[in-house]
Amino acid sequence: MSQQTNGPVRGDLPVTGDTIIFRCQLNGVETEIEVDPAERLLDTLRYRLSLTGTKEGCAEGECGACTVLMDGLPVNSCLILSFQAADRQIDTVESLDEAVLAPFLEGGATQCGACTPGVVITANWLLENRDLLDTHRIRELMAGNLCRCTGYDGIVDSIEAALKADGAGGSA
Amino acid sequence: MAKLTGRELYVDDIPSADHLWGATVRSPSARGRITGVDFGSGVDWSEFVVVTAEDIPGRNAVFLMEYDQPALADGYVRHIHEAVLLLAHPSRETARRAAKLVTVHVETESPVLDFCAEPSTEDIQYGPDNVFKRILIEKDDVEAALAAAPIVVEGEYFTGSQEHVYLETQGMRAHVDGDVVVIQGSMQCPYYVLKALKPMLARDESEIRIIQTPTGGGFGGKEEYPSMIAGHAALLALKSGRPVKLIYDRWEDMAATTKRHPSRVRHRTGVDEQGRLLAQDIEVVLDGGAYLTLSPVVLSRAVIHAAGPYACDAVRIDGRAMLTNAVPFGAFRGFGAPQAFFGLERHMDVVAERLGMDPVEFRRINLIRDGQQTATGQTIKDGVDRLEVLDSALRSSDWTARRAEFDRQNADDPLIKRGLGLAMVHHGAGFTGNGELMLQSVVHVAGTQEGGVEVRTASVEMGQGMTTIFTQLAADRLGLDADSVAIAQPDTHRVPNSGPSVASRTSMVVGFLVEQACDDLRRQLGLADDVRGSAVTEAIKAWYSDSSSADLIGESTYEQPHHIDWDEETYLGDAYGAYAWAAYVAEVEVDLRTYGTRVTNFVAVQEIGRVLNETLARGQIQGGVAQGISWALLEDFRWQDGAMQNCQLTNYIIPTSDDLPPIQVEFLETPYPFGAQGSKGIGELPMDGPGPAIANALAHALGIPATAIPITPERLMGELDSIAALEAS
């Protein structure tokens, strides 16, 4: 007789049933909402604020599909509890301008699109912080965003095209 | 653009109020009788909807090829993580926590875990011998040819499984709309889901509606398993009367869904001193896992490709797919061919080495020429210059100079070893043999009030670019702007059955039907075949200006090209209407301090009929090559009683941008008359070559056998230690 008490479903997402007020500057707008103290920023964005551009890919900070900017730095929103983002500036994919994204469309940076919001958040951060390229390669800087479709060439090529378009260089 | 801005709505993004979250309780045991189920304390069970096998209105099976796989285990389980019962609750977290509080008691029986071992009487769970499918291909007398051959070389090769790791995990939403059960979700084959749900729910197609939502990657992983999740979501929605979302997290997706079949391939190859292939005796064994899924068809593609793009008069290919009590294996890009090619193309290098021959020359001598026959007796006459495919790859990789350079460097450098490896492959596009004939795909191209058209197919967009390609094909055919062409969302109440989005068939087969449906639309408008552009637009508008007109729908149905002649009984004849051909070169660097292998350059040259869209075609090849590199070097499983233990991206590794080199892609084009604009299928081809090319490069760098993948640092260390021990003794 075999007996096993824990089923295979992992889903260790704690809830306390309590609520706290969470305030932040979200995509440039002062935002205030009730959240569970144990709630992930990813879930607050997706299920309370309907900002579903940010995706869950692995829930453990490996894949980068949930990447958002917190005070201008890319973070995995699956690893951040919402209260930890209190009073910070949070920018999601929904804040990005279509004009900024054009090179990614032409360069084959997106196929299925599931990694894409995270990829473009990180890529746009890179484009706005070009001095990083003095010491790091594009492929290093993009290593926090897994993509299973493109083999990464389309992503790297698109970033290079975007850099060239504004007259700056960069090495892959 | 919607994908870039985050506005594309995948299934878990669809605005949905008042829905329940589903969760699945699974078997803790690999095989045995269920003796009871306990609902533990910690949640208020009155808040839950619970579905068991008894709640299934129709037949308890997820039907595709057979009815062997239950939707919910009914008294007996055949693999760990088999679904036993379903829960739904308004809170996702509570639903998932509750699933862990349910205990399934199982009186265990000894599981079958070795797909290569002869099963004992107690092991038998399918047919008389646990063989899901056996296929034998025989061309001439292979034993006589082997007996007469001056040199016979044997080899045995293994490939591991592979998890798809589409970035969007699997998920479905179900709700009941009047008399209709509506399913929305991530899938490759809406009509497969419909086919499975009809008997399960005991409803006809008018009472079930399957809608594909934008799909975040498939790679074959969303071919069979979505039918299971859709069934579960539908059962919960029917019982609760509320919409239900059933979205797997990464752990559950990796633990429970199908994966690539592990394989063992054995070769006995007869050659003469000049390097001519005289006999190929090949055995292919696949681990099918606990249920049939599509294993017979995967085996079919494996055996047909197992002798490779070479001409040999005497061939025997004996394949079987075996039941084990592992989580079922299923469709994965390449569909058995990558496994067969790993064995074949690694073996070609081994044979060349035995002959003291250059591996390129050995392949060149035997590469199939127009007028020669494949293993199934298919005469190749496509006019493709296959030698040019090979030579292009050699030129672009600077093969001869680099091989010599690495040999010199390796002799001098004790720590860094470099190697260059080649693989040549072909890949048949579309369903095998008469498969397309049996599918009878139908495509509609409907005129719109505005004078444009809407293309209606069941082909899904999952990142491969179907939307762009079909838009381009219809616009080109009718001379319209891309803006005048809409692509219908696959919805079984709106689009005809154009078959599944699998087998590299979408552009070549369904795209060809899109062109023909455009022609039919033009005929219905009374226009000549060469009328294009504004005349078409005006004629469509004129059609609708008469309000009594019926909808204008151009239709096409698949017709098998006359050149295809296949015998399903003997497995002889034209296995595919067309093949794409490729030569891949991998350059590797091994650091003997870490045993880590890096691919430092990769050249992929392929002949694909015609390139429909350069960016998309290149993306397909680069993405497939990346998956192949990853399968060969990184993707390692920890198995326990047939279940994957490392179900996380922390311990199941796929490459980052910094782990891969730029992948150089070159296309050669010889148009295929029965593919859209001359195209042939390319989606799966790039998965076939990287495995053996990398193993051959590692053998070149280190002199190791490299007969099994993945070649992780641990395996590499083991192989090198064995060689060292052998040399010391």
Image (tube, rainbow, N blue to C red):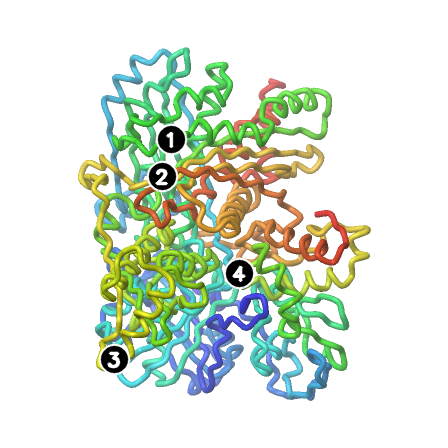
Closer to us: B217 or B37: B217
Tag 4 subunit:
B
Asked which secondary structure carries label 1, the reply is loop
Residue B395 sits in quarter? top right
Dot 2: within a 10 Å radius of its alpha carbon, few (fewer than 14), some, or many (20 or more) residues?
many
Q: Mark 4 touching mark 1, by CB under 8 A?
A: no
Where residue B514 appears, as percent x and y from the top left, is 32, 58
Q: Is residue B8 above or below residue B163?
A: below
Disc 2 marks a residue whose amino acid type is Tyr
Residue plotted at (47% across, 17% down): B354
* Subunit ID for the residue under disc 1: B
Determine the secondary structure under disc 2.
Answer: strand
Q: Which mark is residue B579?
A: 2
Earlier residue among tags 2 and 1: 1
Q: Amino acid at mark 3?
A: Asp
Residue annotated with mark 4: B167
The residue at 29%/26% (across/down) is: B371
Q: Are marks 2 and 1 in contact (CB under 8 Å)?
A: yes
Question: Visible in this render: residue B61?
Answer: no
Crowding at mark 1 (Cα within 10 Å: few <14, some 14-19, many 20+):
many
Say which residue label 3 marks: B546
In which chain is the residue bearing label 3? B
Q: Which residue is mark 1?
A: B309
Which residue: 72% across, 86% down? A30
**Viewer-nearest of discs 2 and 3:** 3
As displayed, is residue B655 above or below residue B29? Answer: above
The circle on residue A4 is: none
How far apart marks 4 and 1 lie (CA) works out to 33 Å
Q: Callout 1, which amino acid?
A: Pro
Answer with left or right where residue A133 lies relative to residue B509. Answer: right
